[in-house]
Image (cartoon, grey):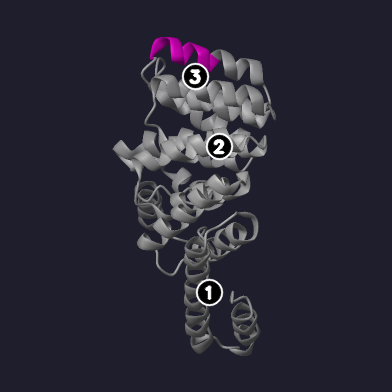
């Protein structure tokens, strides 16, 4: 859902302060609004933020970089550097600042320094990956992510990124492996299950399509109204019926599963139709789905 946009230039200082705090707690970037709040409200009396000031500087700095406001980001970094001249968090912000300006070698030097100082912090390595992606160096980013995952094997965010990069390179086998690693950390996540099913279906071949069908069905156990997973069951079963040498029992199994999924799709669209302002738009979809039934 897109956040409601309001004019933050006229709110009180306390309203602005509370808004920034709420967005930090929710991990919501809302970068344009953060910059607007800072420049028009909070920057008039930064000392009133007391213990929150440095946290707000960091929040505003990241928002400013998102908005290509390197001037404001530089101001925040300078203010933080004066308070914490040896801080690794400030140095990380400096690296991000140089990334935003396209000064890649300077940024890389900062991240190398941070990694050498604290090899247990995954954030510095991931900034290097982000920097490589910013330069369009996908293969180098893949290599850096694999090196990172040797030390932080349970980092699901890194595995997800690696999966997407492998898909970009059409390396479906490695993409599937990366998604399997993600599932180890969240085995009941229906989106991840469906994503792995999509990858295995795209790989093709009877074995992969059979595995895809199993993952689509597993996804439906945790999200029964997932239309994409239902369509996945239909497509994988249809593919198996069309391409595989099947016994009569197997063909019946796939046909029954596909038709059951189609019926659930129809029921889902009928529910949406009853709630829609223009129900006729769903009528054609329902008729089309009914026409897909296998006999």
Secondary element type, mark 3: helix
Secondary element type, mark 1: helix
Q: Quadrant of the C terminus?
A: bottom right
Q: Residues within 10 Å of mark 2 (few under 14, many from 20)?
A: many
* Magenta region includes residue 43: no
Q: Main secondary structure of the magenta part?
A: helix
Picture coordinates of residue 246 (x, y %)? Answer: 55, 57
Label 3 or label 1, whichever comes before in sequence order = 3
Secondary element type, mark 2: helix
Label drawn at residue 147: 3
Label drawn at residue 262: 1
Picture coordinates of residue 93 (x, y %)? Answer: 50, 27
The residue segment tinted magenta is 110-118
Choose between 92 and 1: the one closer to the eye.
1
Q: Residue at x 39, y 55 (%)?
A: 19
Choose between 68 and 248: the one closer to the eye.
248
Q: Residue furthest front?
A: 247
Picture coordinates of residue 273 (x, y %)? Answer: 53, 86
Q: Residue at x 58, y 89 (%)?
A: 279
Label drawn at residue 175: 2
Image height check: is 92 above or below 43?
above
């Amino acid at each position: 859902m897109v956040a409601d946009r309001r004019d933050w230039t006229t709110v009180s200082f306390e309203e602005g302060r509370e808004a920034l705090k709420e967005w930090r707690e929710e991990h919501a970037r809302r970068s344009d609004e953060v910059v607007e709040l800072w420049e028009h409200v909070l920057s008039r009396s930064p000392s009133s933020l007391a213990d929150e000031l440095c946290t707000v500087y960091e929040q505003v700095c990241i928002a400013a970089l998102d908005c290509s406001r390197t001037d404001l980001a530089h101001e925040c970094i300078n203010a933080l550097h004066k308070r914490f001249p040896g801080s690794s968090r400030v140095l990380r912000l400096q690296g991000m600042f140089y990334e935003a300006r396209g000064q890649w070698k300077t940024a890389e030097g900062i991240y190398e320094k941070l990694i050498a100082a604290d090899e247990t912090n995954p954030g510095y390595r991931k900034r290097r990956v982000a920097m490589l992606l910013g330069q369009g160096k996908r293969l180098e980013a893949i290599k850096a992510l694999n090196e990172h995952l040797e030390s932080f094997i349970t980092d699901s965010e890194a595995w997800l990124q690696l999966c997407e990069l492998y898909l970009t390179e059409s390396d479906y086998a490695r993409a599937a492996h990366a998604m399997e690693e993600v599932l180890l950390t969240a085995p009941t996540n229906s989106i991840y299950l469906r994503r792995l099913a999509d990858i295995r279906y795209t790989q093709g071949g009877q074995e992969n399509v059979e595995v895809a069908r199993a993952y689509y069905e597993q996804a439906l156990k945790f999200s029964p109204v997932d239309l994409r997973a239902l369509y996945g069951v239909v497509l994988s079963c249809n593919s198996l019926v069309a391409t595989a040498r099947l016994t009569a029992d197997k063909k019946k199994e796939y046909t029954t599963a596909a038709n059951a999924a189609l019926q659930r799709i129809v029921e889902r669209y009928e529910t949406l139709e009853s709630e829609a302002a223009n129900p006729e738009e769903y009528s054609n979809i329902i008729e089309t789905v009914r026409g897909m039934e296998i006999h």
